[in-house]
Amino acid sequence: MLRRPLLAAAVLAPFAARAQAWGPTRPIRLVVPFAAGGSTDVAARIIAERMTETLGQPVVVENRTGSSGFIGTENVVRSPADGHAIVMAATGTTTIAPHLYANMPFNPQRDLTPVSLAFASDLVISVTNSHPARTLPELVAAAKARPDSLSYASSGAGTTTHVATELFRLAARIEMLHVPYRGSGQALNDMVAGNVHVMVDQISGSIGQIRDGRIRALAVTGATRHALLPEVPTVAEAGLPGAQCSSWGGIMMPANAPAPIVARLNAAVRDATTHGPVRSRMAAAGADPAHSTPEAFAAFIAAETEKWGRVVREARITVS
């Protein structure tokens, strides 16, 4: 994902003017379909605080976990499109899962209305300290010298960390063994212990272990170097531009939402993600604030869906 062009896709003034035509009449539920404390949850809570101020009603984060994000997302899909139920949609559930699950309980592009992109979160390719690689080219060379000798951890089959690693593997033309875990925490613990060699994880999830010297960062996956890891090169700088990607989160609501409601919520997200204190808190948490028009967000989702579908097909990723 190219973060800078997306950030430049600001909401146009006429759209913002229409946003004043609707206001919430009771608290808004911002459903996060993942566990509390994760990067998506943290970003959602920071944004929700500012939206509460601008909308005049509490924006209450509600964690509804389970089934790869399906439970929480479906809860919003089945809610009235009156602006009082929104979801923090994420890369995996919205653009990867449709290629992996034949019987999803909803179709993200059909059953949800895009409101705005909210944040992007670059990933970092790291190795356990027991591995000798000090650069990404050295890791790739080691994998090519001994195919399938390296193992990589993910937060689970079909998750963003899994598919992003497969994107890296395809770009580098290497073979590695996948070891799925139930969450990034377990995966990182095993990499610190040296039980697995490689992991591609959100910077926000790995930054503590990297700074403590418990694992070694080789490259970040964004278009530019990341402020939290300025000394770490991008995958493009390391010779693998095809491995560039980011995870992201964005506000969506039920299908067929009235335009004035979408406009008002879009303006609230834009206000939050351009508000100085919000931006500082999100950046410290490893989430880069972003916003877009609903139309730009819809186009972005379509492009991401196509991109990750290609990776799923070429890497022959399946889930049980």
Image (tube, grey):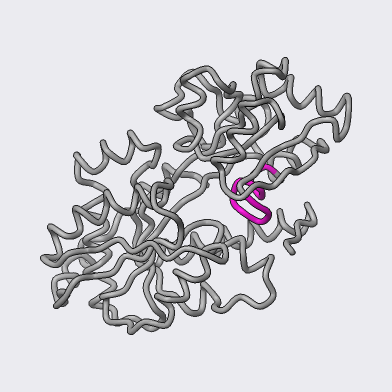
Determine the residue positioned at 25% across, 67% down.
265
Q: Is residue 195 magenta?
A: no
- Residue 13 appears in which quarter of the rendering? bottom left
Residue 311 location, x and y as percent?
A: 71, 53
The prevailing secondary structure element of the residues shown in magenta is helix
Front residue of 116/47: it is: 47
The answer to whether 181 is drawn above or below residue 261 in the figure is above
In screen coordinates, is 75 left or right of 276? right
* Quadrant of the rendered image containing residue 132: top right
Q: Position of residue 266 (x, y in %)?
A: 27, 64
Residue 45: x and y in percent read 29, 52
- Asked if residue 192 is positioned above or below residue 76 in the image, the reply reads above
Of 181 and 264, the residue lying toward us: 181
At a point 61% along the width and 47% down the height, the residue shown is 155
Q: Residue at x 37, y 73 (%)?
A: 253
Residue 31 falls left or right of residue 24: right
Q: How many marks?
A: 0
Q: Residue at x 45, y 22 (%)?
A: 230
Residue 160 in the magenta stretch? The answer is yes
Q: Is residue 96 above or below residue 221?
A: below
Magenta residues, start to end: 156-165
Relative depth, front residue between 36 and 283 = 36
- Classify the position of the C terminus by image quarter: bottom right
Q: Residue 105 location, x and y as percent?
A: 57, 79
Picture quadrant of residue 304:
bottom right
Q: In the picture shown, does residue 245 fall above or below 284?
A: below
Q: Which residue is at the front of the view, 254 or 205?
A: 205
